[in-house]
Image: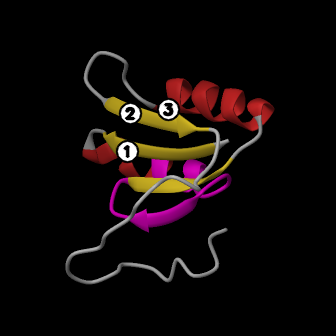
Amino acid sequence: MFVIIVYDVSVERVGKICQFLRQYLNWVQNSVFEGDLTESEMKQVEFGIKEIINLESDSVIIYSMQTEKFINRTIVGIQKVDTSSIV
């Protein structure tokens, strides 16, 4: 499945969540990751996020869809990373 994860966490946890998500997904912009995950990987990511964040004050939104095929992406301004290698 194709996943987009957007997070808003306390400054002291930003590095931890970013480092964790880089193990599974592609960093595309500050606080935004995307990529393909298996069902198992998705469960690992959700569990890992819950272990890192403060459930009372932090926020993570996970968008998931079966395929990236129907997503229309428009970038206004600079592109933070090269996404040409993202399948």
Q: Nearer the viewer, residue 41 or 84?
A: 84
**Residue type at mark 1?**
Val
Report, in whole angstroms, how far the alpha carbon at label 3 lies from the one at label 1: 15 Å
**Relative to 86, 33 lies left or right:** left
As drawn, 22 above or below 65: below
State the residue at coordinates (42%, 29%): 53
> Label 2's element?
strand
Indicate whether 26 appears above or below 53: below
Q: Amino acid at mark 3?
A: Ile
Q: Quadrant of the N terminus?
A: top right
- Disc 1 to disc 2: CB gap under 8 Å: yes
**Numbered tag placed on residue 6 in the rendering:** 1
Sort mark 1 into few (<14), some (14-19) or many (20+) by Cα contacts within 10 Å.
Answer: some
Where residue 2 sits: x, y (%)? 61, 47
Looking at the image, which residue is at 27% across and 47% down? Answer: 11
Range drawn in magenta: 17-31
Residue for badge 3: 52
Residue 48 circle label? none
Location of residue 68 (image quadrant): bottom right
Disc 1 versus disc 2: distance between alpha carbons? 5 Å
Residue 28 in the image: state x and y as whole percent: 44, 67
Mark 3 and 2 residues: CB-CB less than 8 Å, in contact? no
Name the element at disc 1.
Answer: strand
Q: Label 3 vs label 2: CA separation?
A: 14 Å
Camera-side mark, 3 or 1: 1
User: Residue extending furthest front?
Assistant: 70
Residue nearest the viewer, comparing 48 with 13: 48
Q: Where residue 37 sits in the image (x, y, percent)?
A: 71, 44
Label number found at residue 61: 2
Instruction: Give the residue at x 34% y 81%.
Output: 79
> In front here: 62 or 23?
62
Q: Earlier in the sequence, mark 3 or mark 1?
A: 1
